[in-house]
Image: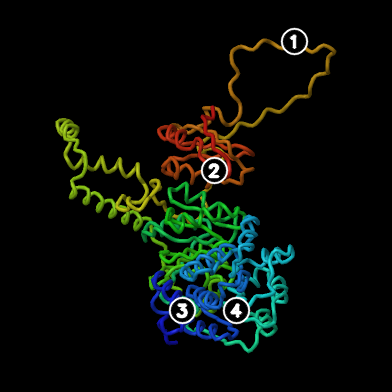
Amino acid sequence: MQKKLFTELGLSPEVLKAISRIGYEEASPIQSEAIPALLGGADVVGQSQTGSGKTAAFAIPAIERVDPARRHPQVLILCPTRELAVQVAEEVSKLAFFKRGVRELPIYGGQSYDRQLRGLHQGAQIIIGTPGRVMDHLERGTLSLRELGMVILDEADRMLDMGFIDDIREILRQMPEERQTVLFSATLPGPIRELIAEFTREPVNIRIESKTLTVPAIDQVYYEVDRRSKLEVLCRLIDLQDIRFGIIFCATKMMVDDLTEHLAARGYSVDKLHGDMTQAARERVMTKFRKRSMEFLIATDVAARGVDVDDIEAVFNYDLPHDGEDYVHRIGRTGRAGRTGRAITLVSGREAWKLQNIIRFTKARIRRERVPSLEEAEQRRANLFFETLRGTLEEGKYKRHDALIDRLLDQGYAPTEIASALIHLVSNGEKGRSSTTATRNTPEPRPAPREIPREEPEFREEPRDLPPRPARPKREAPPARSPEPPARPPREGKREPRGKNRPGSHHSGMIRLLLNAGREQEIGPGDLVGVIAGAAKVPRELIGSIRLMARKSTVDVEAGAAPRVLSKLNGIEFKGRRLSVTLAD
């Protein structure tokens, strides 16, 4: 399909000026076809891949059709989520920047009614809303559709999936029959086709054909991993490929919460987005993400529907989506505006069958890759450190310590030995990415990658080398009860502590720590290992036996690392509570 210049589409000087201000030059295929048809007054059914520019395809004609002198709703745009409604409202605002008197208003759940009522009272002509909140205003009588001239259903298939079909029908029934109806959808399932047949009049069908339903600029790969190794593989891929800005998709809100905690504990700059968050929190997270104040946004499918950022480097499918359509929507977040992108999928167990269905649906080539080895990860880390060290030497902007080095040389140490010892200290203290990327706002050093186990590591409640517990002596029958119990002999000295936490139960060279979190907080041994390795930078081999109880846990750590664990873990947020760590004894 041939692209056109915006100047060829018959647009007003004000809109062309706004388009030039934004930086658009050439219209996308969906814009080249849809804008002339909509300006001509025809009903339109548009079908195109995500990220194709469909928002501007319907927003520009909507703005052109508004009469600024009439201060009442003239255009209604329905969106499946509040994030998408806000995104569309921002796009409309940019395109109507030079159209004096044209006002847009987003209305969605979670926002103050006062602000929405004030905007309606002031005469907003373009209403962008979610079906639930639009229905709410209609029932309250605060929104009138009697003089509406245009209705747009954006991502109609997603509104169907989210159960809004009845609300949409009721909204359409309350509109004037003489109106223009526009529908954009990635797919056209049966109920959507019924909606088109009932509420549109001889619509112009626009379909952007492509060999695949995904963006060709996206490099798509997948890794087959054990479910329990997903976190380690994810971190290894991020570090090896030096990815600094992306979205990680999870299947459930609980998984989003857990993965956010794990990655934050490992030093990654992350935040989360899902449906249980307040609207203020969601908007705060999205503002941070758009400003690149974080590295990774961890989200569910529905929550990320309104995410529209052009320079996302990669999309990770930590969990596979339910179907091919969700996969298309997910990976469409990267590879936009002429950039290349990456879509990386982690597949475990039965998810392999789901992946095959996705491949059949998208008709795309999703390449299988081998999980990088621990040696490759370490080599990459060494190369980055080497480049950092060489750059520092070449710049010469470092404080000299000649006197200290001379003292070591006088004691007979060779220069190579001194340098190696310093590198050893630095690499043990900073197990995260090399400081070559320090200008990229890396928050904390990250733990070194560890070998991915074939099986889940076994955590025992007691060290393995303890002698077997002696059998209890057989009890004798209790003597007959006397009316006067014998006097208890006085205690001699302090009683030895009982139970498994006494000092004698520790490994040699280990110290047992007590944490105020246990099974009731839904933590496992892996969670404790992750937070200790991530927050305190303690290598995994220095962590010993772990014992989980209802509201607390004990962990054995190497004696030299215990002070660091006590100082780094005390007071941090872990599993929804402020962590307290003390000596178990």
Residue 574 circle label: 2
Q: Nearer the viewer, residue 46 or 227?
A: 46
Quadrant in the rendering for residue 150 = bottom right
Foreground mark, 4 or 1, reads 4
The Cα–Cα distance between marks 3 and 2, rounded to whole angstroms, is 56 Å
Residue 219 visible in the shown view: no
Residue 121 visible in the shown view: yes
Q: Say whether marks 4 and 2 touch (CB < 8 Å).
A: no
Q: Which residue has dot 4 on it?
A: 183
Quadrant of the drawing holding the C terminus:
top right
* 171 on left or right of 492: right
Q: Which residue has dot 3 on it?
A: 12
Foreground mark, 1 or 3, reads 3
Q: Earlier in the sequence, mark 1 or mark 2?
A: 1
Q: Earlier in the sequence, mark 4 or mark 1?
A: 4
Q: Is residue 488 above or below residue 553?
A: above
Q: Nearer the viewer, residue 369 or 258?
A: 258
**Badge 4 density bin: few <14, some 14–19, many ≥20, Cα 10 Å:** many
